Image (spheres, helix red, strand yellow):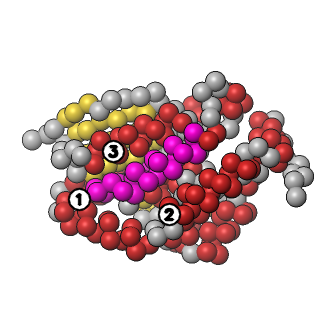
C-alpha cells in the first residue's frame, strides 16, 4: 500500500512522505538553492521527525532546479536581510548535518548540479551520495576569506584523506562529479539523462531493504569513520566566527558581489 503523508513545508524547503520515502527538497532554485538559517533548521526538523516515524524507510535529500545547493547565501540581499544571523546559520548548519548523520535510516543525497560550501557538507553527511555527470563539488570558502564549516573538515577528510581534503579546502578547486567518484568522495555518478532512473532504483533498493540491518550498519560505519565530527563542529565554529568579522571576509564578499578578484590583506 502506498502511504502518503504531508510533512510541514517551510519557506524554501518542501517535505513530503510517499511510499516510505521522505523527500526533503531545497526549493530556492533561482539562487541554486542557497541556504538560509530557516532552511537549515527545516532540514534538521525533518530529520528529527523522520527518526521517530515508522513509515519512513529512507530519506531523499535533493535540490530543485539545476543545482543541489550553492551553500550559505552571500548575496547582498542575503547578507543584509533582517533575519541574517551568521552565528545562527553556523549553528543551524551543524545541527542539520548532525541530524542527517544521526538519523537511524539511510539518507540519499541527490546531486544533479552544483554543490558548494555547506551544500557539500549536507551532501557528504548523507549515507549514499549520487551525482549526475553535470554536477561538481566546490569548497569555495577561502575565496571569500572564510574556512569550511558544517563539519566539512571532518566529512571530506573521512572520505578522501588529508592531502586531497587540503587541496579542496585551501585551493578551492572545483571537483567534477567524475573526479569526485574517482577520489572516493561520492558513491556513484551517472549520465544526466540516466540520473533520475538510477536514483529511483537505489532508493527503491534501500526502501525495501532490512531496516534494522541498515540502521546498525550506518551507525557502525559512522562511529568508526566520523570520530572527529563533533570536534570539527567546535573548531570550525570558533574559527569561522573570527573570520566572519575580519577585513578579508568583508573584502571577499564585496568582491564576490562586484564580480572582481578580492584583495586580501589580513595577516
Residue 167 colored magenta? no
Identify the residue shown where x is 42% and y is 64%: 188
Marks 2 and 3, the one that precedes in the sequence: 3
Real-space Cα distance between discs 1 and 3? Answer: 23 Å
Q: Is mark 2 on a helix, strand or loop?
A: helix
**Can you identify the residue that label 1 sits on?**
205
Crowd rating for badge 2 (residues with CA inside 10 Å; few <14, some 14–19, many 20+):
many
Real-space Cα distance between discs 2 and 3? Answer: 19 Å
On the question of residue 56 being in view, the answer is yes
**Residue 88 shown left or right of residue 58 in the figure:** right
Name the residue nearer the viewer: 220 or 233: 233
Residue 106 colored magenta? yes
Crowd rating for badge 1 (residues with CA inside 10 Å; few <14, some 14–19, many 20+):
few
Residue 254 at what x, y percent from top left? Answer: 80, 38
**Can you identify the residue that label 2 sits on?**
229
Residue 231 at what x, y percent from top left? Answer: 54, 64
Identify the residue shown where x is 36% and y is 56%: 102
Do labels 2 and 1 touch, CB within 8 Å? Answer: no
Which label belongs to residue 48?
A: 3
Amino acid at each position: 500500500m502506498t502511504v502518503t503523508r504531508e510533512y510541514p513545508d517551510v519557506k524554501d524547503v518542501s517535505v513530503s512522505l510517499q511510499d516510505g520515502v521522505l523527500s526533503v527538497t531545497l526549493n530556492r532554485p533561482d539562487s541554486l538553492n542557497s541556504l538560509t538559517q530557516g532552511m537549515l533548521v527545516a532540514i534538521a526538523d525533518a530529520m528529527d521527525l523522520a527518526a521517530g516515524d515508522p513509515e519512513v524507510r529512507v530519506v531523499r535529500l535533493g535540490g530543485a532546479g539545476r543545482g543541489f545547493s550553492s551553500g550559505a547565501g552571500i548575496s547582498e540581499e542575503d547578507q543584509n536581510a533582517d533575519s541574517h544571523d551568521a552565528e545562527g546559520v553556523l549553528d543551524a548548519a551543524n545541527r542539520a548535518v548532525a541530524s542527517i548523520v544521526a538519523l537511524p535510516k539511510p539518507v540519499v543525497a541527490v546531486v544533479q548540479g552544483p554543490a558548494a560550501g555547506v551544500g557539500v557538507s549536507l551532501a557528504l553527511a548523507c549515507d549514499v551520495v549520487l551525482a549526475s555527470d553535470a554536477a561538481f563539488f566546490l569548497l569555495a570558502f577561502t575565496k571569500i576569506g572564510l574556512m569550511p564549516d558544517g563539519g566539512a573538515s571532518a566529512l571530506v577528510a573521512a572520505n578522501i584523506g588529508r592531502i586531497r581534503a587540503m587541496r579542496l579546502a585551501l585551493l578551492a578547486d572545483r571537483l567534477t562529479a567524475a573526479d569526485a567518484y574517482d577520489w572516493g568522495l561520492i558513491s556513484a555518478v551517472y549520465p544526466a539523462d540516466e540520473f533520475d532512473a538510477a536514483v529511483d532504483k537505489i532508493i527503491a533498493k534501500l526502501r525495501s531493504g532490512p531496516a534494522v540491518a541498515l540502521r546498525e550498519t550506518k551507525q557502525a560505519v559512522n562511529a568508526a569513520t566520523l570520530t572527529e565530527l563533533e570536534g570539527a563542529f567546535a573548531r570550525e565554529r570558533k574559527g569561522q566566527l573570527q573570520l566572519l568579522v575580519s577585513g578579508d571576509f568583508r573584502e571577499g564578499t564585496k568582491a564576490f558581489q562586484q564580480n572582481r578578484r578580492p584583495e586580501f590583506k589580513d595577516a
